[in-house]
Image (cartoon, rainbow, N blue to C red):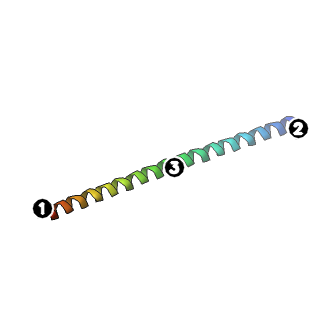
Amino acid sequence: MTPKQRYDERKRLRLENDLRAEQRRQADFDRDDEMQRQFTRILIAFERIADVMELWADQQVSA
């Protein structure tokens, strides 16, 4: 292999490695975003449950 070929091969491998690293970072960001959305949905569900329990308690006192 000539020095130019070795240089080109190293450059190609470095670019592939950088691309894979960027893809991993993007996948991590996507996963974090999805976890945040799921956490928000859970919190909203708890708030709804709390609202229903409060309404039920108010109706029990009124009755």
Q: Height in image: 14 above or below 35?
A: above
> Are circles 1 and 2 on residues that touch, CB within 8 Å?
no
Residue 13 as seen in the image, left or right of residue 23:
right
> Are circles 2 and 3 on residues that touch, CB within 8 Å?
no
At which x and y percent is residue 59?
15, 61
Cα distance in 3D space between marks 2 and 3? 45 Å
Residue 49 as seen in the image, left or right of residue 10:
left
Q: Secondary structure at mark 3?
A: helix
Task: Give the quadrant of residue 53.
Answer: bottom left
Amino acid at dot 3: Asp
The residue tagged 3 is 32
Amino acid at dot 2: Thr
Task: Give the quadrant of residue 18.
Answer: top right
Cα distance in 3D space between marks 1 and 2? 90 Å
At which x and y percent is residue 49?
29, 59
Between 25 and 51, the one lying in front of the other is: 51
Q: Secondary structure at mark 2?
A: loop
Q: Which label sits in the foreground, 1 or 3?
A: 1
Q: Which label sits in the foreground, 1 or 2?
A: 1
Q: Nearer the N terminus, badge 1 or badge 2?
A: 2
Q: Residue at x 57, y 44 (%)?
A: 26
The residue tagged 2 is 2
Query: Which numbered dot is residue 62?
Result: 1
Residue 44 as seen in the image, left or right of residue 37:
left
Between 59 and 25, the one lying in front of the other is: 59
Find the residue positioned furthest to the right: 2
Q: Height in image: 33 above or below 57?
A: above
Query: Which numbered dot is residue 38?
Result: none
At which x and y percent is residue 13?
75, 43
Between 56 and 3, the one lying in front of the other is: 56
Is the residue marked by circle 1 packed among few (<14), some (14-19), or many (20+) residues within 10 Å? few
Q: Nearer the N terminus, badge 1 or badge 3?
A: 3
